[in-house]
Structure formats: C-alpha cells, structure tokens
Image (tube, grey):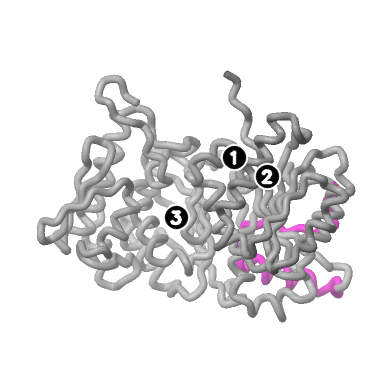
Amino acid sequence: MCGLCGLFGSDDHWTATQPGRVSASADPVRRRKARQECVAVVNRLLAKRRVNIRDWQGQNYVLTGPTGQEVVIDTISDIWPALEDGLGGVFDPLADENVSIGKRDRP
Amino acid sequence: MKRLASVPIILLSGFLGAGKTTWLRNLLQQGAEERVAVLINEFGEVGIDHLLVEPIAPDTVLLDSGCICCQIRGELKDAILMLLSRAQRGEIPRFERIVIETTGLADPAQIQSTLLFDPVLRHQVVLEQVLVVVDAINCMDVHAKQPEWAPQVAAADTILISKTDLLCERKIPDLQERLAAINPFAKQQRSDEFNTLDELTREPSKNAGFACVQVRPREVANAETLSLTLDREIDWTTFVIWLAALVHCHGQKLLRVKCLLNTTTLGQVLIDGVGHTLHPPQHPSTSMHSGEPSRLVFISRGLDIENLQASFEAFVSRGNESWAKRQ
C-alpha cells in the first residue's frame, strides 16, 4: 500500500499486471497513469453507446450507463459483463459496427 | 520467516486411452531419483489409474469426484494444499514436483485457471508445463471428432506422441504437421524419448520464448489458426482492452492465444492464454532482436478468422494496413 495516498497495490488481474509481476506496478503514479490510459481507451470505444468509465480512487472503476445508472467494477475485464447486465448490451469486438468504431477512433 | 519456493506442477492431459497413465507410470519407474507427488483424476465411480501408479509413487492421491474441469476444482485445491501441508509437517517426504493427471475428458483451461488465479494456490505452486499425450494411431480418425480433443491439444506446451511404434514411420511427419496446425508452438516429442521429468522440463518452456513452427494453413478437428506478424510497435493498453473484450465474448471458441509483442511502453511482452484463462503477461527470457516483428497466433474453433483479423487491425493497428500480414 502506498503510504502517501493509501492505495492498495493489489490490482492483480492480468489486464493490470506488469510483465513479470503478479500484480500492478507498486509505483502509485505508474498505476494511476496506466489506469487513466485504460479509461481513455474504453471511453473512446463506448462513446457511441453513451457509456463511460472513470477511475475511482485508483482502486475501482465506475461505469456509467446512458441513463445515468452507475456500477462499481473491480477490473477492466468486468466492463463487458456489466454492459451486458443492463448498461448498453453486449460489446463484441468482432461485430461489424464495433470494428468500424475501432477503425475510426483509434489513436 | 523464510518464504518457501513455489512447487512446480506438471499438468498431464490427453484424450481417453491416449496413454497418459502408461507414460506416467513408465516415467516414474525410470526417474526414481525424483520425488514426485501425483494427483490422479478419473471419470467414473471406480478409480483404477491410481492403483497402477501407486506402487511407484506412494503419494498418489485419487480425486474421485468425476470430471476435474467442472466438478472438483475445490477438491483439487484441497488435495494440493493437503500434500504441501503434510510435506511441511514431515508426514510425507518432501517432493520436488506435483504431477496432475486429468481425465481424458477434461479441459485443461479450467484447471489452469484454478492454478493461476486461486488466491491461495497461486502463491504456493507454479504451473510448469502442460503435457498432452496424443495417440498416434487414433488421434486423427477417432479422437479429433470429439469436442474435448482439440482444446487439449491447443493447451499443450509439449505434445507427447504415444504409440508411435504402432504407426508406419513415414506417416509420422504428416501427423506432426497436423498437430502443428492445431498448436504451432507446442514442442512435439515421442512419448518414449524421456527418462525423467527433469529431462522433459529442461527444454525451454512456454515462458522462455515463442517458438512457432511455420505450418501450411489447414483446418484440423475444426480448429483454425490465425498467425500475424507486425512490423510496428503495439499500444499495450489498447491491445489489452481488445483482448479482454475478445476473450469475454469468444473465450470458448478461442482455444489458444499466444503473442510475443513489441509494445510501445513495456517493451517485449509474452501473452499466453487458453480459452478464458490468460496467464499474467511475462517478459520473454530470450530477448527479441530489436526490429524483430511481433508475432501473434490465435487458435480458434467456430470463430470467423477473417473477422478476427479485421477486428485486430481495426482496434490495435496504428498506421497503414499493410503492416499486418496473414501467414
């Protein structure tokens, strides 16, 4: 845990881990930066659905649906089941409409 | 307090009758200097395999609740922890390695998931290799028609081909090529080539690098392979989010994902996944030369490969489209 900001360095899902480690970077600044980059990419992908995500205290993410409904999730991978659970429907990266979003909105 | 090293685990899989128990029994007999604990899972109410192995490996534990992949993940965890605990207390001799023999119908991905992500197990054991025994006589004609077979082969780090003495020698290269079409990065060995587990695991494992043999594109057991090479660096964050979405939506159809990536922020990263289970990313132990292209292999069944490639190029590619070439 970071002594300054109180962040638990326990983000151990594979999407957050640093290569060679079992969890995310112990450096809180790097962790925050990595999370912000994830947030930016996800928001770009889901903008058309009026769904967005934000980091919450470097510990969780808050997913907001088109009606304003909010769900707290733990990892980036939890976005997809949360979407299916009433926040905008299935996001299939192979579906034509999503492929065109990816093509158009890539950085 | 001294932290104990993680105990390596070898996952031994293969279809019914492929020769898993025979191979294990022979290996345990020959490698008498190694201390190995064996966990055997059998499908059916009466276990037999453990009786064949027990005289050689007294630490054999039979997991008798049926199919290991869907029913006894808790029992598997308990059995491993019980073995570790008994060894620490001195009730059984310490062992250097655990071998888990699955049923012939098990999906290794489920077991890998338990070993990798269980909060207790993952700090005490490490999955060293997935060995899959393939029957040279029956695999293409009989086993390939069963839905369990291709995921087992796709999950392998090493494919052990058994019963090669019963097969005409000139047919073996074709068999090897067919197996490589399903799993191009698994080592292929004849099952009688090893005398000890040490000998087997001394060869570079999956984490040591990315050895991908070039194979003619062909469909075997309904499994298709998409191989891509990239000359550009990949944005790690975008790739991770795309892959997470892909695995969530199509994990059951993705038999295996293995990628050696040149990333913009993290350097070289090795990704290895089976179905819904992704191993934590690693830096490869053998460094790529600078400028060497990234390589990605997706083995799937029932997934539209053209769509997969289009999706990858759309989400992850940056720059012109010509950088990704399908092999």
Between marks 2 and 1 in the image, the one whose residue lies nearer the viewer: 2
Label 1 neighbour load within 10 Å: few <14, some 14-19, many 20+: few
Can you say whether B298 is above or below B199 in the image? Answer: below
Residue at mark 1: chain: B
Q: CA distance from mark 3 to mark 1?
A: 19 Å
Residue B327 at least partly seen: no
On the image, numbered disc 2 is attached to which residue?
A: B204
On the image, numbered disc 1 is attached to which residue?
A: B286
Q: Are marks 3 and 1 on the same chain?
A: yes
Between marks 3 and 2 in the image, the one whose residue lies nearer the viewer: 2
Left/right placement of residue A29 relative to residue B247 reads: left
Q: Residue B168 lies in magenta, yes or no?
A: yes
Q: Position of residue A45 (x, y in %)?
A: 23, 58
* Magenta range: B167-195
Q: Determine whether the residue tagged by mark 2 lies in a helix, strand or loop.
A: loop
Residue A90 at least partly seen: yes
